[in-house]
Amino acid sequence: MPTVILMAGTGSDDDYLRRSFGPAVAEAGADLQALAPSARLIDDYLDTLDAAADAAAAAGTTIVVGGVSIGAVVALRWVLDRGGAHCSGVLAALPPWSGPVGDSLAALSARVTADAVERDGLEPTIAAMAATSPPWLAAELSRSWRALADRDLVGQLRTAAAYRAPTLAEIAELPVPLAIAGALDDPLHPIEVARDWARAAPHAALTEIALSEWGPQPHLLGAACVNAWRDF
């Protein structure tokens, strides 16, 4: 497996990527590059992927790209735009939507969080989120939101919530394998989106796993995605 370059979900970060994907990627004998979200978010992601692909081309190698939620969307969009050059696959965990954002709950949640941070401040928003979330999610988002606060968390949330994903017709033109991990019980990342992506792509594998399993044990999400890759 070539070097794996991953991007986080909205409001999450590279720390989570290393914990969720690090063990499975290492077991597969590959190196993981977890990209840190920045204030420029998607633009910086795309610039980094371009540079990595150029370096791979110069070295005569390829990369695998992917991510969680919006990270998976950005990775898929980038591969389609580049025609798959110097990339040998996509790892997509928890696809949130296809095509325009529409009524996606993941995008709505990001917008609501951004509004709350602007209106009430970061710490009151964290407290409100923690009061209505499972302990593992409250701990994870409290950590990542604080970590991203000085990198325009609100701007990141709004940018991600407006980002257009590839349509299923576009995914049908994907020139590289697509390995997907879908959540069976996560309303923000409907399993039907993951199944639609898998049906649309010419060469895809899908592993389905329950949020109740991988939520408290994030390494299981990365393992599900890498296990899908091993089906190729």
Image (cartoon, rainbow, N blue to C red):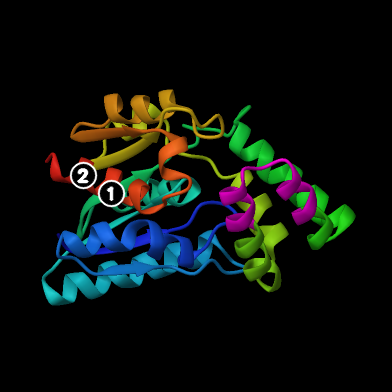
Residue 214, position as x, y percentages in the image: 41, 44
Q: What residue lies at 22% left-to-right and 65% top-to-bottom?
A: 26
Span colored in magenta: 126-141
Q: What residue lies at 60% left-to-right and 63% top-to-bottom?
A: 144
Eyeballing the image, is 72 above or below 47?
above
Within 10 Å of disc 2 (Cα), the crowding (few <14, some 14-19, many 20+) is: many
Kindly identify which residue carries mark 2: 227
Q: Quadrant of the N terminus?
A: bottom left
Q: Is residue 138 magenta?
A: yes
> At numbered mark 1, what does the secondary structure look like: helix, strand or loop?
helix
Residue 78, position as x, y percentages in the image: 37, 52
Q: Is residue 175 visible?
A: no
Place residue 40 in its image quadrant: bottom right
Q: Quadrant of the C terminus?
A: top left
- Please name whichever residue, 19 or 59, is drawn nearer the observer in this view of the structure: 19
* Contact, mark 2 vs mark 1 (Cβ under 8 Å): yes
- Please name whichever residue, 124 or 70, is drawn nearer the observer in this view of the structure: 124
Kindly identify which residue carries mark 1: 223
Q: What amino acid does circle 1 point to?
A: Ala
Q: Is residue 104 magenta?
A: no
